[in-house]
Amino acid sequence: MNKQYCFARLLTWLTLAGLLAGIGLTPALPLNAATSPAQIEPGAGKWQTWVLKSGSELRPAAPPDKAATQKELAELQTLASQRDAKALDQIAYWDAGSPNYRWNEIALAQIQSKPISNPRIGRLFALLNVAIYDAIITAWDAKYTYNRQRPSEVDPKLVTVLPNPASPAYPSEQAVAAGAASAILAYIYPDDAKTFEAKAEEAGRSRLLAGVNYPSDVTAGLALGRAVAAKVIERAKADGSDAKWTGTAPTGLGKWKGDKPLEPLAGSWKPWVLSSGSQLRSAPPPAYDSAQQKADLAEIRTYTRTLASNMKALYWQSFDGINTTWFDWASRHLFEQKLDTNAPRSARAYALLSVAQADAYIACFDSKYTYWAARPDMVDPTIKTMFPDPPHPTYPSAHGCVSYARADVLAYLFPSDGKVIQARAEEAGQSRMWAGIHFRSDIEAGSKLGQGVAALVIEHAKHDGAISTP
């Protein structure tokens, strides 16, 4: 899916540009005639932000005057004459999808190389995509305040590699997203801060090489994105995620067993749409000696595993199943519905998905560490699991909580495919029972909790200033 997604949008333009670059020429005619007459979300600067007070809170100063603009045009002409295969590759890479797209990919790759716990993955993506969203909304406020023309609209002799986006030039949306995303990733992974900063600079420079932004658009965009990220990081530093657990796990029949419970304080972290992690707390799980618990145990003991169920259970246990697949769903649907060129609406979709994921983890872990319920093989040691139990209590199922929260939000955003998306959430939840690591009651409670979180996210979305349909 990623290869197809990366090249589909630029195929026509890059085929031409690549062929011409290969023989040492630049196109004789501008390629910016494809600019759409319809402006992209001119009212998005007034959409509700998550951390900022409004889209105008950090409005940058006006763009440079006419004389300075002429100097910038000369600089862009020089860059256009220096385009080579590497430059075209950078343009293609950073222009694929919306401004969020590459940064979510970069974050996923970073987490795989330097793992963090699943609740912290949820926190990371919420911080990342909220920062990009608020930065994009701020950029749109500035764009339609200043209405700066794109470079080739001022100087038709400037040859662009890409068609001009149908929005004002200042500040650059790719640069704004890059500034915000790189700062958030540097906050989470400070040892790699320089790498993220270099990627942000490359993302901004790609817009200059393409000829669709001025240097000052990029400079202002990077600065604005970083300023928004600073506000988001300020919130992150006070969200309770740095607290250290000093408690002890309760003991007794039906209680979880282990020395190092994973993130026992995650339920107390500051959420985004919930009033607290306990707002939707699940009802108590079935008692260890109840008829319901016995029935749940019997179901696991007698379940006959198949190749298909094993493969699905292993997939949903994998990093791709837990994380990547949901962002791939969002990216693909944005692409299919031509929303990848609509930066505010794409940023909104990624932010809503990420907030649902983060709050679902918070709500789930609040319930988990309220009840400390034992895993199936802790109740009945004869049960053989497909893989080791996750190091946290069984009730409710995190796969149920988080998968259903993400699926319901995606179904709201992309209703034509909603049933398919929700079916995947059901499969993700059921797969934990097939693997022997969860009771059915865990999955049912988790799905209910996740759907409750999604309902709050969707309610937020209905009143955030964007049109009611994505």
Image (tube, helix red, strand yellow):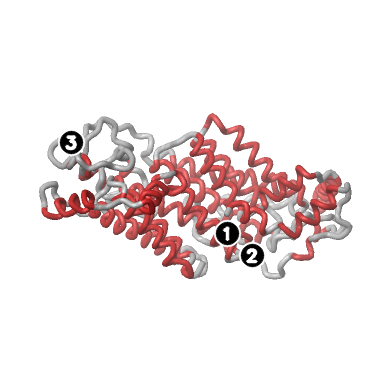
Q: Split into 4 quadrants, where in the image is the N terminus?
A: bottom right
Q: How many residues crowd mark 2 within 10 Å: few (<14), some (14–19), many (20+)?
A: some
Query: Looking at this view, is 282 or 404 the one in front?
Result: 404
Residue that carries the numbered disc 2 in the rendered image: 40
Amino acid on which disc 3 is placed:
Pro
Residue that carries the numbered disc 3 in the rendered image: 250
Residue 33 placement (x, y as % from top left): 79, 65
Mark 2 or mark 3, which has the lower sequence index?
A: 2
Q: How many residues crowd mark 3 within 10 Å: few (<14), some (14–19), many (20+)?
A: few
294 relative to 34 in the view: left or right: left
Residue that carries the numbered disc 1 in the rendered image: 344
In the image, what residue occupies the spot 36% across and 46% down?
270
Mark 1 or mark 3, which has the lower sequence index?
A: 3
Residue 222 placement (x, y as % from top left): 64, 44
Q: Is residue 123 visible?
A: no
Q: How many residues crowd mark 1 within 10 Å: few (<14), some (14–19), many (20+)?
A: many
- Determine whether label 1 and label 2 are within 8 Å by CB: yes
Q: Quadrant of residue 136?
A: bottom right
Disc 2 is placed on an element classified as loop
- The residues bearing labels 1 and 3 have C-alpha atoms spaced at a distance of 47 Å
Q: Is residue 335 visible?
A: yes
Query: Looking at this view, is 346 or 76 the one in front?
Result: 346
Residue 463 placement (x, y as % from top left): 44, 65
Residue 141 placement (x, y as % from top left): 61, 58
